[in-house]
Amino acid sequence: MAKILLIGANHAGTAAANTILDTYPGNELTIIDRNDNISSLGCGTALWVGRQIPSSDGLFYSSAAALESKGATVHMETEVTGIDFDAKTATAKTKNGSELHLDFDKLILATGSAPIMPNIPGSDLGNIQSVKLFQDGKRADELLGKPEIKTVAVIGAGYIGVELAEAIVRRGRKALLFEAESTSLASYYDDCMTADMDKTLGDNGVELHFGERVQSFKGDGVVSGIVTDKGDYQIDMAIMAIGFRPNATLAGGKLKTIGNGAIAVNARQETSIPGVYAVGDCASIYSNALRDWTYIALATNAVRSGIVAAHNACGGSIESPGVQGSNGISVFGYNMVSTGLSEKAAKKAGLDVLTTDFAALQKPAFMPDNHEVKLRIVYDAKTRRVLGAQMASRENMSMGIHMFSLAVEDGVTIDRLKLLDIFFLPHFNQPYNYITMAALSAK
């Protein structure tokens, strides 16, 4: 049995810890996390801030106490200050200033990611923040409760930025959404798919500032204005939602990394040093669409990687099948899901791709409560391998994207989908299903 040191206990770390404790109880597991909570479902933060759910109580699915009850030793609010990979030791400082000296046989790094905070003049003013940790969401919630906070700028129209813009409007505040790209959600969808999301945001009161770059913030102690390359706006609060970078500082130049600094791992989640594993947002991940290693920060990817590393650290033998980066969003009742690569992302990666699009009502026209579904499939121009798919509707069509995720993973061609056996019942769909119709119309 082994001494296992796990650094970081959010999604990837919690998944690793539960796998070790539930499946390999004879091991000695020590967990260190610098936060005062674990397993916070950040995807639910905007729902809470926007009062779509009554409280934040349900945003946690585990705790230090729960892991301790299974036999782990847990040190919360404790910062790892150094790792000696050769000696297999680590030092850490607790919240009261005392120092811990720990030795290990196996090490799992689950240090996550950190928000990108560009060096914009005035960004150190009060009432400017990111929303990454639970505490960040709590602070944003408190600020939105103050009567003097009337106008809020959100910088970045990715998933978090769009969700928070909705939350701000739902709290009765004015939301200004700034994005350097020409549309929202540009990292996940092609422009033809995001047009309706942009309209939904605008129709519900979000003031859109696309193709606009923030240059500075103004204020005396706290922010009161934002200056872009196109205008000057009065605001009372700003939320930075530009994106995330891997938090891989503990690699210390000893572990191999990829271009953006994420720790390089193999299919067993093992780093360049045997017995040292990296999981979640701090690590690289294999994309089945690209057929190459890349970086995709998603909670679902983190959980899977934590499980894989835990088994291997305990003597098992399991490899990750790779991921497609499947994701989704629901804002003001408009739903979007995607997997794999958009046309834009595929071309940026140097791939020669084609697309096929189809739109139809989810159910026959005589059925009530019925909405259009838009579908785009991206496929390789030569091999015809499906590389990605995007879906959008006011219907909950989200389960459809899982089929496309499996198609990308297994290298299914667009032609294989043309006569796919899909059932029909008016309650659910149409006899001429948009999935097969999109495939049949492929070039």
Image: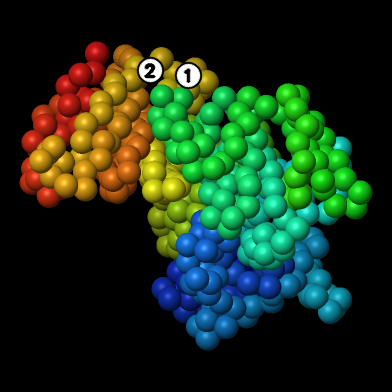
Query: Residue at left 31%, top 14%?
Result: 382
- Whether label 1 touches label 2, CB < 8 Å: yes
- Between 365 and 400, the residue placed more toward the observer is 365
Which label is found at residue 358?
none
Give SS at disc 2.
Answer: strand
Which residue is the extreme one toward the right?
220
Quadrant of the image occupied by residue 80: bottom right
Residue 54 x/y as whole percent: 50, 71
Give SS at disc 1.
Answer: helix
Q: Which residue lies under the disc numbered 1?
A: 347
Query: Residue at left 17%, top 30%?
Result: 436
Which kind of residue does numbered mark 1 sit on?
A: Lys
Q: Is residue 350 above or below residue 123?
A: above
Residue 4 is left or right of residue 224, and the answer is left
Quadrant of the image occupied by residue 192: top left
Q: Earlier in the sequence, mark 1 or mark 2?
A: 1
- Between 166 and 264, the residue placed more toward the observer is 166
Residue 291 is left or right of residue 217, and the answer is left
Q: Which residue lies under the disc numbered 2?
A: 353
Query: Residue at left 44%, top 29%?
Result: 195
Residue 29 x/y as whole percent: 58, 75
Q: Is residue 311 above or below residue 224?
A: below
Residue 193 is left or right of residue 173, and the answer is left
Cα–Cα span, label 1 and label 2:
7 Å
